Image (cartoon, rainbow, N blue to C red):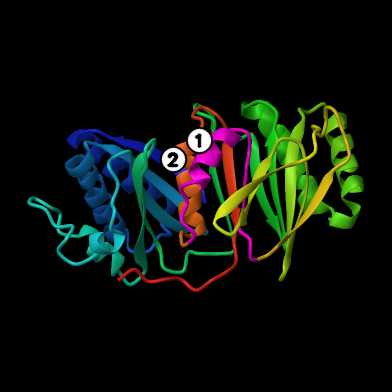
């Protein structure tokens, strides 16, 4: 899942700008379902931000050729999510007439709400997403501000998933992670031979005089998830109602190589991995708030919204058991 555009909603003119931005994306891409519904939904979500919490953010996201829209705020939160999605409870004077209830009962889209009210954090995320969106693995990326390239890479190959973070930002960092991605696609990989693989990656980067890279490779099996990696990509493993932080072995491929680490987890435990654009301290604050029933998409949005460090490449990967898509009546 990629963050296409972040839009600040602070007045009526910013709503018009958001609408124009979405129209331009839809016109350019021409592959999304029910474009008029997406535009109306964007207007309703933006209007709600002004009416209820004096503004917030709209995120336009894309995953697997699907458009998603998220409304994010730091207001008081919604205590009863089921009530918020009932018919009539979201209607206000001068409303656009679509409301959360109508968005949640579309043939293709539905609504997921995550709302927090604690001593230190207040906020709500309303996510409009396709009904068949939920998958076992979800990645969310955002680019360094002012750059059209990213120093992070999320790549999939069969049962393997790569998350890599190049040193620094911009084109030099992007060159390194693109080399790693190409090597990952072109060569066979096995967790049993991970040291050999990382050594070859190290030699490739050194030959190209590229920057160093830290990375994790996840092997997703029916009953286990293997994690092989090196460097400061941190990840968290769900243990009952809490998350345990796991840190990989030190080392930067291409600069200072050390032996890789390899860890196994039962598949029933959700795993969340993040690059160093998102600090462990801030991610831990997010994890303490997460509710177990949230989807992978909502967990990623929570982490990006409440814990991200702006002006940095940042990427989050969520791996969870596949489950049936839930309805929110």
Is residue 270 left or right of 87 when viewed as pictured? right
Residue corresponding to mark 1: 308
Which quadrant is the C terminus positioned in? bottom left
Residue 325, position as x, y percentages in the image? 46, 71
In the image, farthest residue toward the left: 93
**As drawn, 147 above or below 299:** above
Q: How many marks?
A: 2
Q: CA distance from mark 1 to mark 2?
A: 6 Å
Residue 236, position as x, y percentages in the image? 63, 48
Residue 299, position as x, y percentages in the image? 49, 52
Magenta part of the chain:
268-292
Question: Which quadrant would residue 49 be assigned to in this image?
Answer: top left
- Residue shown at 83%/31% (left/top)? 254
- Viewer-proximal residue, 188 or 192? 192
As for residue 278 lying within the magenta part, the answer is yes
Q: Do we see residue 188 in this rendering?
A: no
- Residue shown at 50%/26% (left/top)? 146
Disc 1 element: loop
Disc 2 element: helix
Residue corresponding to mark 2: 305
- Residue shown at 78%/53% (left/top)? 263
As for residue 236 lying within the magenta part, the answer is no
Residue 207, position as x, y percentages in the image? 88, 31
Around disc 1, counting alpha carbons within 10 Å, would you say few (fewer than 14), some (14 to 19), or many (20 or more)?
many
Is residue 35 left or right of 321 when viewed as pictured? left
Around disc 2, counting alpha carbons within 10 Å, would you say few (fewer than 14), some (14 to 19), or many (20 or more)?
many
- Viewer-proximal residue, 325 or 261? 261
**As drawn, 166 above or below 51:** above
Disc on res. 271 = none
Give yes or no for contact between labels 1 and 2 (Cβ–Cβ under 8 Å): yes
Is residue 152 left or right of 254 when viewed as pictured? left
Q: Do we see residue 209 in this rendering?
A: yes
């Amino acid at each position: 899942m990629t963050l296409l555009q972040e839009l600040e909603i602070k007045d009526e003119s910013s709503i018009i700008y958001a609408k124009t931005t979405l129209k331009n994306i839809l016109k350019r891409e021409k592959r999304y379902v029910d474009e008029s519904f997406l535009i109306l939904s964007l207007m309703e979500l933006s209007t709600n931000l002004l009416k209820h919490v004096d503004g917030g953010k709209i995120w336009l996201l894309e995953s697997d050729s699907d458009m998603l829209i998220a409304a994010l705020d730091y207001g008081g939160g919604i205590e009863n999510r089921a009530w918020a999605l009932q018919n009539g409870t979201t209607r206000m004077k001068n409303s656009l007439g679509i409301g959360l209830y109508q968005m949640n009962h579309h043939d293709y889209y539905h609504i997921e709400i995550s709302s927090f009210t604690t001593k230190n954090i207040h906020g709500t995320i309303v996510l409009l997403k396709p009904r068949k969106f939920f998958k076992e693995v979800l990645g969310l990326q955002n680019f360094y501000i002012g750059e059209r390239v990213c120093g992070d890479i999320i790549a999939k190959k069969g049962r393997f998933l790569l998350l890599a973070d190049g040193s620094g930002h911009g084109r030099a960092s992007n060159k390194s992670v693109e080399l790693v991605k190409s090597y990952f696609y072109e060569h066979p990989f096995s967790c049993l031979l991970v040291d050999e693989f990382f050594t070859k990656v190290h030699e490739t980067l050194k030959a190209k005089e590229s920057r160093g890279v830290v990375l994790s490779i996840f092997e997703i099996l029916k009953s286990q998830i293997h994690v092989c990696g090196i460097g400061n990509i941190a990840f968290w493993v769900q243990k009952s109602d809490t998350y345990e932080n796991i840190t990989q072995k030190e080392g930067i491929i291409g600069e200072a190589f050390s032996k890789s680490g390899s860890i196994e987890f039962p598949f029933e435990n959700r795993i969340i991995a993040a690059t160093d654009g998102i600090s462990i301290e801030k991610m831990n604050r997010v994890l303490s708030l997460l509710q177990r029933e949230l989807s992978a998409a909502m967990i990623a949005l929570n982490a990006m919204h409440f814990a991200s460090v702006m002006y940095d490449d940042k990427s989050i990967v969520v791996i969870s058991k596949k489950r049936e898509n839930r309805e929110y009546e």
